[in-house]
Amino acid sequence: MSTETEKEELNGNQNKMSKEDWTKLVNAVYHNGTVALKMHYSEVEGQIVNAEVYGPIFVYHVKDEEGSTYSCGFFLRELIARFQSGNDPAMWMSSFFVNLMENKGGKELPKPATNQEEANAMMDKSIIPHCIKEVKEEFAPEEVHAGLALNEEHGPVFETGFPAIREGNNVCAFPLHLLLMHYQINRDPAEILIQGLYKIKEEHDLD
């Protein structure tokens, strides 16, 4: 689903609900996230940040045994889906902190970009090279196309796909601001690209 569609769906859901019910939903999701993480970590703090495009983002701060703090953010839509699925949301949420804790000393959220120039620098120096490297390594030795493209509807996107697939859909693309958002909440932006590529393989029975 595109980010614009998600935004419309999020706004639609918010408009259908009273302000009071929407606040209750957001607070309930925040509470459930805190409870889930406390099943694995003794020290958990959190905050709700409102992002213009993505709505509420739930940022949790977890301490390891040495007292170092690790921070990670989650989107409202994915948390609701995870809690409703019953597919061990506590394990899923804690897995992101397990990955962060592989590097000792803590990991706070990156300093957010304050202007377009800083955002472009983050993309060019960190996010785009990382994403290209990760998708190519994930599917090596298979040839994978990965790089920037321009989408008429969404503007600049990161596009990746399999040139060897000749028929049907062989690429997936994500808006650059979505990759930037993942990066700024300590989530691996390459993860959504890799998931998209595996979905293409599934569609073509190439697992």
Image (spheres, grey):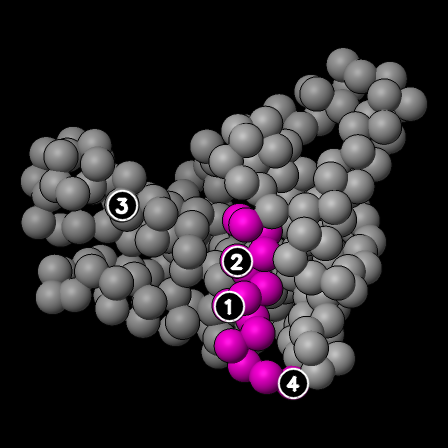
- Looking at the image, which residue is at 70% across and 83% down? 66
Dot 1 falls on a residue whose secondary structure is helix
Is the residue under label 2 in contact with that under label 1 (CB below 8 Å)?
yes
Report which residue position mark 1 lands on.
Answer: 99
Is the residue under label 3 in contact with that under label 2 (CB below 8 Å)?
no
Q: Which residues are magenta?
A: 91-105
Give the mark nearest the N terminus, 3 or 4: 4
Which of the two discs, 2 and 3, sits closer to the camera?
2
Q: Quadrant of residue 132?
A: bottom left
Q: Residues within 10 Å of mark 2 (few under 14, many from 20)?
A: some
Distance in Å between CA atoms under marks 1 and 3: 21 Å
Give the mark nearest the N terminus, 1 or 4: 1
Give the mark nearest the N terminus, 1 or 3: 1
Where in the figure is residue 175, as x and y percent of width and height?
48, 49
**Of the numbered discs in the image, which one, if any, rests on residue 105?**
4
Where in the figure is residue 181, as x and y percent of width and height?
60, 56
Is the residue under label 3 in contact with that under label 1 (CB below 8 Å)?
no
Report which residue position mark 2 lands on.
Answer: 95
Rendered view: 140 above or below 173:
below
Report which residue position mark 3 lands on.
Answer: 198
Where in the figure is residue 13, as x and y percent of width and height?
70, 20
Is the residue under label 4 in contact with that under label 2 (CB below 8 Å)?
no
| Three-letter code for the amino acid on which mark 2 is drawn | Ser
Lateral position of residue 22 relative to residue 4, left or right: right
- Looking at the image, which residue is at 56% across and 71% down? 100
Give the mark nearest the N terminus, 2 or 3: 2
